[in-house]
Amino acid sequence: MGVIYLLIGVSVVIAIVFLSFFLWASKNGQFDDDYTPSVRILFDDEQLKDNQLKDNLNGTGKV
Amino acid sequence: MLLCKVKHNGIIACYHCGDYCENQSIKVEEKNFCCNGCKSVYEILNSHHLNQFYKLETTPGTKNHKQNSNQYKYLDIDEIANPLFDFIDGNTRVVRLFLPSIHCTSCIWLLENLNKMDKGIISSQVNFLKKEALITFNVDEISLRDLAVLVDKVGYTVKFDSENISRASNKSTYLKLGLTFFCFGNIMLFSFPEYLNPDETFLISYRQFFTSLTFVFSLPVILYSANDYLFSALKAIKHKVVNLDVPISLGIVTLYLKSVYDIFSGNGPGYMDSFAGFILFLLIGKWFQDKTYQALSFDRDYKSYFPLAITLLIRGKEVIKPVKDVLVGDKLLIKNDEVIPADAIIIKGEANIDYSFVTGESKHISKKNGDQVYAGGKQIGNSIEVEVTNTLNQSYLTQLWNQSVFKKEDNNNLENINTKLSHYFILVVLGISLIAGVAWSFIAPEHIFNVIVSVLIVACPCALALSIPFTFGNALRVMGKNKLYLKNADVVEKLGKVTDIVFDKTGTLTFQNQASIKFIGETLQENEEELIMSLVRNSAHPLSRILYDYLKENVAFLDGITNFKEVSGKGICGELDEKEIYIGSQEWVKNTVEPNQSSTRIYIKIAGDVKGYYQIENKYRTGFERTIQCLNHNYNLHVLSGDNNNEKKNLSTYFQNASNIHFNQQPIDKLNYIKNLKNEHNIIMMVGDGLNDAGALKQSDVGIVISEDVYNFTPACDGILDAGMFAKIPEFLQFGKYSLSVLKVSYVISLLYNIIGLSFAITNQLSPLVAAILMPLSSVSVVLIATVLIRFYGNKNF
């Protein structure tokens, strides 16, 4: 049954790794705004189209 | 694609803002717009391929009334601009703009795509709840001022409060909560075998290992998570007072020490699971209670009402300077709608000053060359030039802020329900443990220590401590949903105890920007109304605008005015339909002056015949009558108005006690009035709107500010009420009372659990398992009952 020391030791280490992820995230402001990202993720990504458009205007884009 | 939104009754709505399109000629590609402002925003967005704005939501825009490119001129002064930046590196700047009109998904999208409109903008990120945009830009490509103008142009007025620069975030609450939850989970895991069969051989051989682990995980909880409670209790004891944190800390510390002793003496598993769960529940309660309206500010002082910068005239040239640099003798240029930042004398121009925000006087005051004007007045009309006689800090109207009320951090000595209860609670707990100890000294003296400790542990008022956060926290949210935004949960309690309500008149009982107009004299023909309207249409005077807006509902205007003349301070005249028309003051129309004329009047003379006058009066808010009637029954009502007393008769009919209606009240009078009421042990709610109420709001127990736009300037207060919800004041007060009763119910329930726990403790039967069951059970039931009772009532009665 000595293996239980190893198992618990490993599980505690993993738990602490996750805890440090959480601490890092909250210090980095991940919880500062809990609403806007939920909206932002639903925006259609138009970046590509617009870049093409600009490129077209500049005459450098591939059509 | 939907080209223009046609409402079901056939009215055409503006493609940009959704307003009714009065003039259907403002069109682009079959899209209708209500005004040129909206149209130009559309064109700007269209030219930058930002049409997506209109696809995410229908009519997402806001109507932008004033376009004044000089508005942000002050941002060119480094002294003002530099503190506004969050980050400066080379030519890269990061600025946080407060944009109160952010309101929908489209807003987020547009503001995050600002970089498509100007290549100087590197990126932007919106915080919807705080109504902020964090913009990174290259200062060589676009200045802060141009950035502000750009954002303003697409419909978002930029606000820079002197204090919105640093807003505290609640990072440490999340940190604490997360850490405690982690420790709690692990402790539970290692305590779990104990719950199943404590006598198993497997457990006995590993017990020391498991309990040591729980000890390790309990360290962050006691050292970091619990420190708020422990420090608060220590502070209270030092000041020789008892708050709820004292019994809580007593329980926590006993629980912890007993567990540590058990673990290291090998006596048993200890109560670490209960201990961690206990702190976790307390923190959840705190987090729930600490809900704040991030975009609102409850602590503004008068300085944020005044502009950051003003236009100074130096040898005829306009120079923008920070307002704090204004010296006596400086010449200032005050434009339409600008606030006069210091006491001054007019040297050029016709002033028409609105002091309503600082004095409560609703009538605009006309001033001529050489007249004194006071800081805080707002110029309505053409630009004027003034010479400063007194700086802002010594100004006549801002003297109010030298009052002692504003010096003290918190002048609320209202004893809250918790403090009172804590006194009894701690005495009873100590008494019971003493009695139990004495009793056990006769039964079995070896258990005395154990029993006393058990009593202290189980009496720890965890559920009691959760009653307030969840009752008032829920009440706060229900009220917020109904547009009464309270500063914190403590205000709910005070709201439930209010005995006296003091109202301001101008802007509080009456509408801020709406007037009721009555014609007094012989009845006007429609044709005569047409003549009057056609004439006032040509004048920019505020009274003319009011009259025009009133008349345009009924009649159309005629063309062909000749000999139009406007004499400022007097009135206008002109000829139409071969009739000579005079509109204006009594002196202008009738050549007589009646002294002490209390109301604002516009006299009318058509073809030599004085028809009468339009009387412009404040309009009482919708639901005013019902609100006062409801409140009359249960509260003492008072009215303090800075205005003259021509409304006295009218108001007296509504209010039960007419002697409580006072007029011509200076801000300092209002403050003293509240002070006197307080000395009679009344609990006072002050409802006001302007700077003139600031002293009274601060002095009262509950200061509520009524605001048409809650993001606008509001004086320091305990709550901000959306003006549209004025008629709900009785419901809010009723709800406050109800919340207090709910609190009492949950107190009774949590005390019941304490009694059950005590019966285990004094019979020396408190095992870790019993503690681990009782504690969460009591907490959860209190939380549930408070939430359900408050939410149910809230949904039913609002």
Image: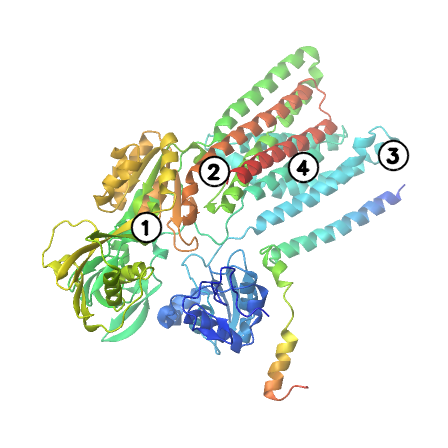
Same chain letter for marks 3 and 4? yes
Q: Is residue B436 left or right of residue B209?
A: left
User: Residue B492 shows which numbered tag?
Assistant: 2
State the SS at label 4. helix
Mark 2–mark 3 Cα distance, whole angstroms, equals 53 Å
* Quarter containing the N terminus of chain B: bottom right
Q: Nearer the viewer, residue B393 or B477?
A: B477
Same chain letter for marks 4 and 1? yes
Q: Is residue B305 left or right of residue B565?
A: right
Mark found first going from the N terminus, 3 or 1? 3
At x 55% / y 70%, what residue is drawn? B3
Do the residues bearing badges 3 and 1 touch, measured as CB atoms within 8 Å? no
Q: Which residue is mark 3?
A: B202
Same chain letter for marks 3 and 1? yes
Q: What chain letter is assigned to the residue under label 4? A: B
Above or below — where is B295 with respect to B327?
above
How many neighbours does mark 4 have within 10 angstroms: few (below 14), some (14-19), or many (20 or more)? many
Amino acid bearing label 4: Gly
Residue B138 position in % (x across, y down) = 51, 75
Q: Which residue is mark 4?
A: B277
Mark found first going from the N terminus, 2 or 1? 2
At x 33% / y 49%, what residue is drawn? B507
State the SS at label 2. helix
Amino acid bearing label 3: Phe
Q: Which residue is mark 1?
A: B691
Q: Nearer the viewer, mark 4 or mark 2?
A: 2
How many neighbours does mark 1 have within 10 angstroms: few (below 14), some (14-19), or many (20 or more)? many
Residue B424 position in % (x across, y down) = 51, 23
